Amino acid sequence: MPKKKPSTKKVGAVAPNRPARKTKRTSVVTLSRRNSSSSTVYPDYDATFRPDDAIVQEGPEVLQPSKLAYRDDARGLYLYHGDCLEVMDHLLQKHPGGVFDLIFADPPYFLSNGGITCHAGKMVKVDKGEWDKSRGPEENHNFNHEWLRRCQALLKPNGTLWVSGTHHVIFSVGYAMQQLGMKLLNQVTWQKPNPPPNLACRYFTHSTETILWAAKNEKSRHRFNYTDMKRANAGKQMKDVWTLTAPKPVEKTLGKHPTQKPVALLERIILSSTSPGDFVMDPFMGSGTTAVVCALLARTFVGIERDSVYLDLTFRRLHSVTFDLTVRIHVFVETQNDLELVSDRIDPIPAMSTEVAPKTDCIFHEFKFVFLSCAHVSQASVVHTTVDVSLQQAWAHAPDGKKRQTTHIVRCETEILRVKSH
Ligand SMILES: C[S@@+](CC[C@H](N)C(=O)[O-])C[C@H]1O[C@@H](n2cnc3c(N)ncnc32)[C@H](O)[C@@H]1O
């Protein structure tokens, strides 16, 4: 079947029913190239990504083995529906020297094998889906080796790969990285402060995941935004133990994925090791957390997902971050000072109008709390920010040290309203 002309957004059988968005029509994305000497390492090095590089066939008729299901040239977002091994093979044919600055992979952990866990206070079987069932240690390792080999090849010479996992998969991933000659940079422990209890009472409560960070090979000169991370950690060197909660309810309002990663985790990964405009890939995209963070942080993104239900969830999440935002700011004054003078200036009540408001659905709702330390509004410094369901929860979850420094809290309420009728 002949390839169709590239369009601004191509959604096939998995397309949700929604109005088309206006985007700029361009057919190639020229990527920032940090290392001008890369072409001497890889003579075939080509940093120009063409969205149809990875397509076998595209078209709305039948789901093809690999298909460009969504494209947004204006923001540089490309989602493929298919098996990641196959899509990566197609990308490799076009980019044998690599094209991505960062790859984040949250692969199957192979842990859905009849065990039990606690969900919403109930004992349930661990069953994330067919894709998460173990096929035995050898086959699991072969699979890990295969997708890791492709990811390594698709990294630019100085690009890095982040892979999350638990003990079910992470040792195989680490071993495969060594077999492939990658350079292990860090073993990050993601610690979850509120894990579900261990119902069997025969093990310690599982409360961590491991994230391995590796460079393409020993010669790589990887990017690490050291100063940004130090600043984000209140001026102290950031350690390799990150305490971050599981995805907040607001991150699941558009639908759920059984192994969804928190936005805050991807934000930290992407901010620590890329620059704006860099090119990121996620071969196991799931609900599209990496896609959402790339859209918010202006990184170019390629995502691959086999399951159309999750691809559809990613569309919806991406769609929600494209709306113009209505932001209301309330200032809670906790001490007497000059902030009181401005509090009544914020969110003024508009003069009465005869205009009737349109009918709307709220499709996204979020509270962001910014904890400030300030003697004067002009000298405020941010000590902590968090997204939470209420001020009470945000305060409860804030570290004690941050609470002590806080004199004011800004609560930003974001609502995205879909207009139903005028
Ligand atoms: C652990 S989940 C990723 C969750 C994701 N990080 C998020 O925040 O939602 C892994 C995803 O990979 C998909 N998957 C599994 N094997 C795949 C393959 N060979 N090619 C593409 N996607 C695959 C599954 O359908 C699942 O949605």
Image (spheres, rainbow, N blue to C red):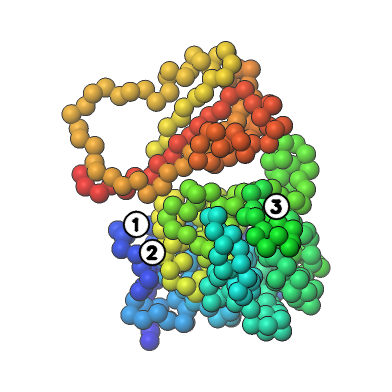
Q: Nearer the viewer, residue 394 or 217?
A: 394
> Which dot marks residue 21?
1
Please name which of the two marks, 2 or 1, marks the residue nearer to the observer: 1
Q: Residue at point 34% right, 64% down?
A: 16
Please name which of the two marks, 1 or 3, marks the residue nearer to the observer: 3
In the picture, measured across the screen, residue 2 lies left or right of residue 225, that is left
Marks 3 and 2, how far apart in space? 40 Å
The answer to whether mark 2 and mark 1 are in CB contact below 8 A is yes
Nearer-N-terminus badge (3/2): 2
| Residue labelled with disc 3 | 191
Kind of residue at badge 1: Arg
| Residue labelled with disc 2 | 8
SS at mark 3 in the image: strand
Please name which of the two marks, 3 or 2, marks the residue nearer to the observer: 3
Is disc 2 surrounded by few (<14), some (14 to 19) or many (20+) residues within 10 Å? some
Q: Residue at point 35% right, 46% down?
A: 362
In the picture, measured across the screen, residue 35 lies left or right of residue 344, that is right
Kind of residue at badge 3: Gln
Q: Residue at point 71% right, 45% down?
A: 229
Quarter of the figure with the C terminus:
top left
Kind of residue at badge 2: Thr
Where residue 33 sits in the image (x, y, percent)? 64, 60
Where residue 49 sits in the image (x, y, percent)? 54, 68
Asked if ligand 1 lies within 8 A of label 1, the reply is: no
Where residue 76 sits in the image (x, y, percent)? 49, 60
Marks 1 and 3, how far apart in space? 39 Å
Is disc 3 surrounded by few (<14), some (14 to 19) or many (20+) residues within 10 Å? some
Asked if ligand 1 lies within 8 A of label 2, the reply is: no
Q: Residue at point 38% right, 84% down?
A: 2
